[in-house]
Image (spheres, rainbow, N blue to C red):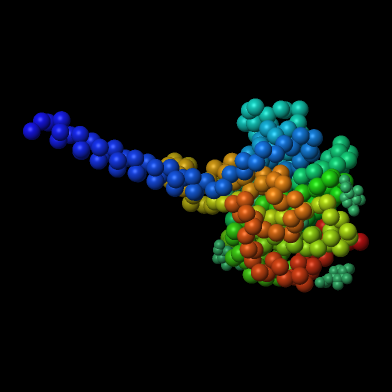
Amino acid sequence: MDAADETTPALTTLLLYAGVIFGGLYFLRRWIKGRQFTERMSAKDKVAVVTGASAGIGLETVRELNYRKAKVYMLCRNEDRANEAKRKLVGCDPTRLIFVQCDLSSFESIREAAREITQAEQVIDILINNAGIMFYPKFEKTVDGHEMTWQSNYLGHFLLTELLLPALKRAQHGRIINVSSKLHHKSKKIDLTTVDDKKAFGMMQPYNRSKLANVMHAHELTKRLRKASVHNVTANSLHPGVIDSELSRHLPFVNKPLIRQIAKPITWFFMRTPKDGAQTTLYLALSKHVDGVSGKYFSDCKLEAENPVATDDAACEDLYNYSLEACGLQK
Ligand SMILES: NC(=O)c1ccc[n+]([C@@H]2O[C@H](COP(=O)([O-])OP(=O)(O)OC[C@H]3O[C@@H](n4cnc5c(N)ncnc54)[C@H](OP(=O)(O)O)[C@@H]3O)[C@@H](O)[C@H]2O)c1
Ligand SMILES: *[C@@H]1O[C@H](CO)[C@@H](O)[C@H](O)[C@H]1NC(C)=O
Ligand SMILES: *[C@@H]1O[C@H](CO)[C@@H](O)[C@H](O)[C@H]1NC(C)=O
Ligand SMILES: *[C@@H]1O[C@H](CO)[C@@H](O)[C@H](O)[C@H]1NC(C)=O
Ligand SMILES: *[C@@H]1O[C@H](CO)[C@@H](O)[C@H](O)[C@H]1NC(C)=O
């Protein structure tokens, strides 16, 4: 018997196994990355405002909106971080990237940013409330006296949304998008009397609470807009997936450089990239499939069920009233 006859079947088997393994890994990775927004929608002549534009999902959202020809206001709390971010936006048109200083943990800073934008723009087409902090380690109050995560993730965006709403209403199709999280499902009904109290604080609670409020806000805002006969502004929220971004910066264990190095291949394979994380945001900002859709919650570029608490009309209304007062917007 010839030696070649022995090796050929062995080689074929080996190649077959390798093919199956690599093919399997490829499709697993594709599945992990989630659905991508591939619709050929131009954002030419559109004005977009993105919070938390200096890193992660926000930065990738800015990149894609700019590629699609939108003018993008990058709201960042730190100018150095914003400049660093701009340098990463290779291939973007810098004349359509405008930095505006905005720290969501300060109502004054938000008001100043809104003033700057509305002085420059009559019309805003897209508002993306994306900035967020997670698992902030210590109980801390903002200059306005609210718990840090509650204001950074929720109240600050509430105020910004209210201040930019007149300009959004002037758009043909104004779209407000809230980057929430799947973790909002973990939150119990929000007790508005204790949100700023130390006894309601913990590693997890403020985050899922603030993210539930983002979803409730979309629900209530939709109701109010429709009641006021505004039909050209939509408001939706979403879960971006589990993304390898800087959001984990406050996690004590995960954030160690050594741990990050060791975990790198695992996170690289099993987590979504910030670009993947921007896909549902872009879908809600641009897709014609969501024209007129409002008050809903999305994940992976499709409709998902939200926490039932978020559709409790009375609770949503209560939250809205509370927020108007907390932001000094009482009418
Ligand atoms: N990553 C995930 O797996 C995941 C899952 C579910 C939901 N989300 C949501 O996705 C959104 C984006 O997160 P990410 O993953 O991209 O995180 P990230 O990489 O940490 O980016 C967060 C951004 O928010 C900004 N920011 C934080 N506090 C701010 C404040 N007080 N004022 C202004 N800007 C502030 C940060 O600015 P600096 O650069 O100055 O720090 C940064 O640009 C968040 O709302 C998060 O809750 C993420
Ligand atoms: C998003 O959440 C903010 C508060 O974080 C709220 O003011 C706004 O109405 C919400 N909008 C949408 C579209 O969910
Ligand atoms: C959007 O609706 C509001 C309220 O009905 C209206 O005042 C505004 O002119 C509309 N904008 C556009 C561009 O259609
Ligand atoms: C928030 O979510 C965490 C798990 O992610 C859970 O342990 C905690 O009880 C939740 N907090 C509230 C207030 O629902
Ligand atoms: C919210 O405020 C409005 C106007 O002040 C009031 O009519 C309504 O009853 C309030 N809703 C709740 C749930 O308190």
Indicate the quadrant where residue 36 lies: top right
The vertical placement of 203 against 261, above or below, is below
Q: What residue is shown at x 40% (from left), y 44% (from top)?
A: 25
Q: What residue is shown at x 77% (from left), y 49% (from top)?
A: 175
The picture places residue 104, in percent across and down from the top left corner, at 74, 49
Query: Which residue is more in the foreground, 243 or 146?
Result: 243
Quadrant containing ligand 5: bottom right
Give the side of residue 302 with respect to residue 158, left or right.
Answer: left
The picture places residue 145, in percent across and down from the top left corner, at 76, 58
Indicate the quadrant where residue 51 lies: top right
The vertical placement of 57 against 152, above or below, is above
Q: Quadrant of the C terminus?
A: bottom right
Q: Quadrant of the N terminus?
A: top left
The picture places residue 41, in percent across and down from the top left corner, at 70, 39
Q: Is residue 31 visible?
A: yes
Q: What residue is shown at x 77% (from left), y 45% (from top)?
A: 126
Report the number of discs. 0
The picture places residue 201, in percent across and down from the top left corner, at 63, 64
Q: Is residue 326 visible?
A: no
